[in-house]
Image: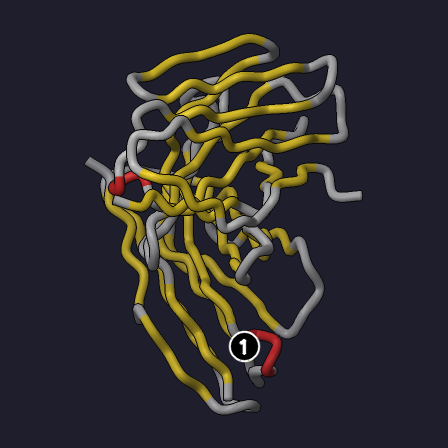
Amino acid sequence: SQTIHQWPATLVQPVGSPLSLECTVEGTSNPNLYWYRQAAGRGLQLLFYSVGIGQISSEVPQNLSASRPQDRQFILSSKKLLLSDSGFYLCAWSVTLRGPINEQFFGPGTRLTVL
Amino acid sequence: QKEVEQDPGPLSVPEGAIVSLNCTYSNSAFQYFMWYRQYSRKGPELLMYTYSSGNKEDGRFTAQVDKSSKYISLFIRDSQPSDSATYLCATMDSNYQLIWGAGTKLIIKP
């Protein structure tokens, strides 16, 4: 069976500090990978998605970046955090053409607070 | 105008009540509509999906799409405290990317 891991679960960082959130998937090959941010009452905002190693699409211009160094590893980074980067960060995976819909499977999320 | 609109709530109802959760969407080309459930401090998980118009039932849950009014609904019968969660509607664009509603926080009071 497939499993998705995210860490850390919670993080408190000062403004201007760097960020690195990691996501790994087990039990599937060549997944599509996604990073979302969820703010209270505002739904899921797609930040980045990747269809393969080294292939990253950015949906929202900001001070965040993503990398996919291995097939089942997705990393979200920032060089300098802003207050507005606070939120709940979710990693997700899907498999193309598995079915009629793009069913995405989510990790447990990271609660980031920037002070 | 957002492509998918959803009232964030919270919606509070007594145990055993019928719950109606709703979304509207703007693009008549959307064909698939999904409902995800998200418990507190967890990631969302797919509850059910429907294609085009009509109803789909799964146990106590019924998803309904009205394409003429661009309205999608999720009904929960005999609601339980364990149904307390945030419910997110979503649709899919031509690139298979999901477009999300804001999510409605549902509270079922024992």
On-image quarter of the N terminus of chain A: top left
According to the image, label 1 marks what residue?
A: A78
Residue A101 horizontal/vertical position (percent): 49, 24
Front-lying residue, B17 or B81? B17
Circle 1 residues within 10 Å: few <14, some 14–19, many ≥20: some
Front-lying residue, B48 or A64? B48
Q: Is residue B21 above or below residue A98?
A: below
Residue A16 horizontal/vertical position (percent): 56, 90
Q: Residue visible at 24% across and 45% down?
A: A3
Front-lying residue, B94 or A50? B94
Residue B101 horizontal/vertical position (percent): 59, 42
Q: Is residue B61 above or below residue B89?
A: above
Q: Residue furthest top?
A: B54
Q: Is residue A34 above or below residue A87?
A: above
Q: Quadrant of residue A12?
A: bottom left
Q: Is residue A53 left or right of residue A71?
A: right
Residue A33 horizontal/vertical position (percent): 45, 47
Judged from the image, the secondary structure of the residue bearing numbered disc 1 is: strand
Q: Residue visible at 59% across and 41% down?
A: B100
| Residue A56 visible in image | no
Amino acid type assigned to the residue bearing label 1 in the image: Ser
Q: Residue visible at 44% across and 74% down?
A: A112
Q: Residue visible at 40% across and 69% down?
A: A111
Q: Residue furthest left?
A: A1
- Label 1: chain? A
